[in-house]
Structure formats: structure tokens, C-alpha cells
Image (cartoon, coloured by chain):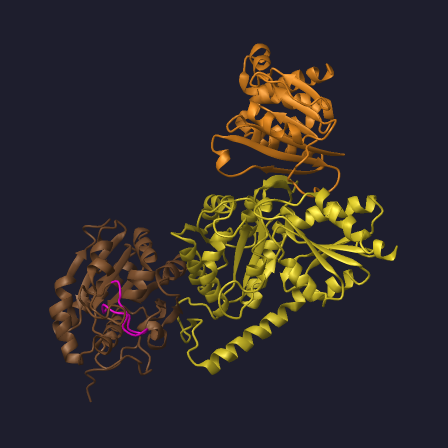
Chain colours: A yellow, B orange, C brown
Amino acid sequence: MAKVLMKGNEALGEAAIRAGCRYFFGYPITPQNEIPQYLAKRLPEVGGVFLQAESEIAAINMVYGAAGSGARVMTSSSSPGISLKQEGITYIAGAELPCVIVNMQRGGPGLGSIQPAQSDYFQAVKGGGHGDYKLLVLAPATIQEMVDMMGKAFDLADEYRNPVMILGDGILGQMMEGVEFPAEETALTLAEKPWATTGAKGRKPNLINSLFLDPVELEQHNHHLQRKYDRMAKEVLWENYRTDDAEVVLVGYGSSARIAKAAVDLARAHGIKAGLFRPITLFPFPKAALQEACKQANHVLTVEMSMGQLVEDVRYNLEFKVPVHFYGRSGGMVPTTRAVLEEIIRWAHSGEEDKA
Amino acid sequence: MLQEIILAGFGGQGVMSMGQLLAYAGLVEDKHVSWIPSYGPEMRGGTANCSVTISDVEVSSPIITEPDTLIVLNRPSLEKFEKDVKPGGLLLINSSLIDIEPQRHDLKVLTIPASELANERLGNSRVSNMIILGAFVGLTGAVTIESVIGALKKVLPEYRHNLIPLNRQALEIGIELAKGI
Amino acid sequence: MITVFERPKALTAVKTHYCPGCTHGIIHRLVAEVIDELGVQEETIGVSPVGCAVLAYNYFDVDMQEAAHGRAPAVATGIKRVHPDKVVFTYQGDGDLASIGTAEIVHAAARSEKITTIFVNNATYGMTGGQMAPTTLVGQVSTTSPRGRDSAIQGYPIRVSEMLATIEGAVYIARVSVHNPQEVAKAKKAIKTAFELQIAGRGFTLVEILSTCPTNWGYSPKDALKWLVDNMIPIYPLGVKKTLEEGKS
């Protein structure tokens, strides 16, 4: 099939359908509105259900009910709406229900702006709501990558019985790029869900629940969850770009990584050995791969659309062995390639004064 | 080849679809393309703009801060974006709707009375944007006229394909104008 | 030997945690009897709330989901949309349904979700310790209205059934009580009607059941029943608030 020009939000909606998603519950918020709009049109055509809920809180709890009933289900929102969904997300994590949650991030805090941002990184990778839990977080950088990862997102959710978050931003949602969908819908083999509430015909009743009044039991449950999060470590994904001999390694995800990549090329043209490490899974974090990519680096620079969030995990995962610097814009402002280049030049030449 | 274009005008003037058509034309040529709108309250009747990138290599950021080309369909857009164009860049102005002169002298400027031309020569003011697009194609060679036509075939529903010859004529008028500078 | 009374099949053999004199036990039994009589035990999916009935999933012998506070109608919506052929009910108290979950219940009714809500109104937050509820009566003492609910400060109780009866998507809304055998019989009839209408695919159904809370009200079980009759029924009049004929048919 030839490439088509498609908006990120719409391409994501189509990819979800091709991944077997048949249920969507959401609430309008910019800049992700094209996802529910697209699915409102498409889901009924494939026998699915689109429902606009009365709030983000209701929407995520509908996801809870549908996921608990065994469905492939998704919701999407943007930053303030994701904050509202946190209640439901922690229940979903606690009850171990598979679903996909999309966050097309916008500027914050508060009502913030509707322009692209990456300031929900902590919220996404550290849990987000109350309690010890993790989401599996995927960060696409192009529309094609977003489309390609939807099937994986649903499969991972089913495999681990865990919510998976697609962490995008206003750029990825709003932009159009050429995108290619698989030639024909492959016959999906979906995981069996014998734990789901489907009516207890011929079996003992099932229970979907996150309540454990007995602290001994809850601690055991938390250990069980933790072992699951540890098992997820094998799912790490990342991209290395010109890192082999890089003295300055940039680290960025999603839209920021695209900008960083262009800056790397410019830096190379200036004779600076620069490279980019792009985590594709933000949780689990590709720690070993990051360390490998940075082993010859003198400086590491994170490029973010935030006031500095990813930088903390990069420092932590590099075990503070390499100086890690931060460059970011926030509030809906986007780093320019030129500004990132200036940062690269600054760190590439830092220390030269000391030697002189 | 890397061509970064900002298209701006009033909401409803067709800048968004003009940008999409241009991006699609790039895609027809297997180039890397991106299109991104300004989104939000301003798209409801105020000034609207979109950024289009056509490139031989992967597009880094679809957000354009220093365009190679600026296409403006109204005065506020000219006033807003003129300063951002790269030195030596291209500025296309629909002079039917803009009554001021650009301030900069380091740009290649083509003022096109697109609405009048469309009316007078084609009897249809709705293809004025295609005249401007034709001029862009003629001046930059970023895409070919055939690719624009190819993109139109993808964008227009089948029952609108009868409009393609008219659009081709408009593009050709633009290409002619481009030869003038 | 003739069996004249036994546990409904849709109830488990688990001993409930409810306080002596609390009418949750009666209401659980009525719901289970209706499930048995309709023969839908293996077709039913229930949603338990946050509040005294949070452990209802231990007592109903059907598939259950435990919802966040107030969100049971949203969870039930998700279930019913996936399994339109199953019987889905929520079991919610007044704090859960009429305070934190007001939006969810109103919109489930507005969408005419084909679910049945069992709404237990005892005019107090039982589980958390007798705080003022959205249904606490004016003048009623609670741990957060120690001088009695003052309407000038704390506003007025919400009549949920009357409010929901104004919504077009609600096809059956009734308020019943279980303070004596006659009323228990009427309550069961209302619950059965609601389930039957759901099964017939008619739309949203809700039965509000006035209930006692001797522990938090500070009365003996017997006096609590009398308090309910004397104080709650005048404010929350019993009866069918909406039937199918008034709703969409």
C-alpha cells in the first residue's frame, strides 16, 4: 500500500482499529481531538463502540469496566485530562487490567496551553496516581513509528495485564506525515482472558478488584506487581544515531529527539562528534543501552520540552559517571535545531579553557 | 533539498488545504514531508497558518521558525511572519488582499494579484490559491506541477475530478508569473 | 423435610460484615432472590461501590467488578457496552452515588444505559464513620454536622429518584423501603421490575431503597426503623417515580 498523508491523531486511531481495538471511551481536549473524532466515525463501521463520556474520570472508569470484561480498549487525552484519569489508571494498574492510554501532551501546569510539551514525563514513568505501580510507556517520534507500535502496545498490555501509555505530544498529534499501513489486516490472535467478567457460566465467578483490606495480602500483591515490572525490563527499545564515536551524546524522546537528531547532523558538519540516544520505551528505561551509547562521551545533553524531567533519569541511569546537562523549552515552546546546536558546541568546547 | 514553507492567511482562505496539497505533492515524489497547523482558538476565524517541510531526508522538526518561503494571503500574516524568513528567502504575496509593501529588501518577492487573475483569466476566484502555488512551484522546483495534480487526485473525491483541468490552468498561470522574475 | 427458607443461590455462604440492624443484608438478599428467579446468575455482572457495600463482591455469587468511589455507573457502562447481552447492576450508597458520583449516575441515566442501579440511601456515610451525606436530613446530627445539618450552611438533601425521573433516558425509577415485611415485598417487586426492564433492553433503571444505619444514627435497630419511618419517608416519599409509560417506550 502506498504512503498516505495523514494527521498523527487520525493515523493513531486507524492503527488502533487495525490492532483490534474495538472500544474507545474519551472526552474532548485539544490537541488530541482528532483521535475521538476519527474513532467516532470508524469504530461503528467495524462493529466497535465509541462513547463520549461525561468526563475524563468517567471515561477511564468505562475503560476499567470494558478491560475487566475482556475487551481491547483504549482512551486518549492530553495533559490536564490525563491528570483527571489518574484515579482510574491506578485502579486499572491495581486490578491488573490491560488497556492503552494515549497522552498527547500539552503545556502545563494547570490549564497551561494547548501547544506541545513533554512535561508529563514524571507522571507517565513514575506511576502518576497513588500507590506503587508503573505503566509501560512507549514514546514514538514519528507518525509511522506511532502506527507501527499500536499493535505492540495492545499486545504488551495483554501480556502483562498492565496499562500501556503512548506518550506523544501536540506535534505528533497535529502534524501530518506520510504513513504506510500494513497491506492487509492480518488475522489477529488475541490473548485469552479467562479472568475477565463475562458472566460466570460454567465456572466460578471472577472478580476485578484492587482492594486488599488485609495488609499482608496487599504487600504480597505489591511484590507480585513489582516482579511484573521487573520482568518488563526485557521490553526495552531504543535508537542510536551516530553514537559510536560521539563525544557529546544527546538524549531525547519523541518530538524533541527529531530536533536533536537534526542538531547532531549540524554539529557533525561543524566537526563535532555528536550523537543521539533516543529511548523508545520510557518505562522500562533502556539503561544498559544508554550506558553503552555514552561510554565514550565527555558530555551528555538531554533535549526536552519541559523544565528538566528526563534529565533526572538519564543522570540516574548513567550512575552520575558522565556530566549530564539539560536543554529544554516549556509551556508549548519548542527547541530549535539552532539552539540545540549551540548547546552542543558549548559542551563540546567546555573544558578547553581549563586545558589552556 | 530542504524546503521549509509557512503559509498564512485568514481562516477559511484555504491556507491549510493549500499546505496539505503541497505536502501531498512532495509525498507523491517519495520525498519526506510534514505539515503542521497552528491549532487552537485562532483557527476559529482568526489568522491561520501551517508549516510544510519537503525534504530529501527525514524531517527533523515540523515546526518552522525560519522558513525558506513565506506565502501570505492577508496583511496580518505578512506583518507577523516577514521578519522570520531566511535571508535570501522567497516571499509570495497575494496582493489582491494585501495593501502594504514588504519591509525587507533581502528577500525574493513576488506579489501576485491572485484573486483578480483568477477572476479575469479563469472566471473563478476560488482557484486563486492555485495560482500562488503554481508560482511557488515555478520558483522553487520543490515539487513538479504533475505532482500537485497527482496530489489533487488523491485529495479530491472522484466526483470533483472535473475540477482538475481548471486547477491545472491556475497552476500554469502561476508558473508563467514565476518566469517573470 | 420441607425447606421453607434458604439462602438464594446468587448469594455466597460468606458471613457479611454489616452491623446488627443494618438493612443492607435484606437488600442483598432481595437482589439475589431476583437474580435467582430470573435465572440469570450466570449472566450477571455486578459492580460494587466504595462505602459500606464495598465488599458486596464477596457476597454476590456472580462475576463482580469493584469500582472507584462514585464510578460504578461508568464501570457498568464499560461492561454493558462490551457485553450487551449480560445483566449488569451497580450497588451504591448515597455518598457514592449522590455526592462523588453524581455526574456518573446522571449521565448513565441520560445515555439510558441498560443497567440497573440499586441505590441504598441511609442518609449517612456509614463506612467512614457517620459523616454528613448528600441525603442527610436538615437538622440531622452527623460527625461532620455535629449541631445538626443547617441548610443555611450545609444546604439541602438531594432527592435522587425525583431528580433522575426528570431524565428522558431513565425508564424506571422507584423509591422503596424495607422497614417492614409489606415494604420488603414491594421493594423486591420494584427490583424485579427494574431487572426485567433491563433484560428487555428498555433502558436505565434505578431502585432507591431507604435503609437504616443504627450504628451511626445512634439508635437500636428497632428505633432506627421507627426513625426512618418518622423522618426519612416524609422527605423521601415512597413510590414509583417514573415508569416506562412516562419514559421512552
Q: Quadrant of residue A187?
A: bottom right
The spot of residue A239 in percent (x, y) is 72, 56
Q: Quadrant of residue B167?
A: top right
- A343 on left or right of A32: right
Taking depth in this image into account, of C180 and C3 the one nearest to the observer is C180
- The residue sitting at 18% across, 51% down in the picture is C245
Taking depth in this image into account, of A184 and C113 the one nearest to the observer is C113
- Seen from this angle, which residue lies furthest top? B120
Q: Is residue A231 magenta?
A: no
Residue C37 position (above or below residue B158)? below
- B75 on left or right of B32: left
Residue C36 position (above or below residue C4)? above
The spot of residue A241 in percent (x, y) is 76, 53
Find the magenta span and give its range. Answer: C122-134
The answer to whether residue C236 of the structure is visible from this angle is yes
Taking depth in this image into account, of B140 and A113 the one nearest to the observer is A113
Predominant secondary structure, magenta span: loop
Residue A99 position (above or below residue C110)? below
The spot of residue C106 in percent (x, y) is 30, 54
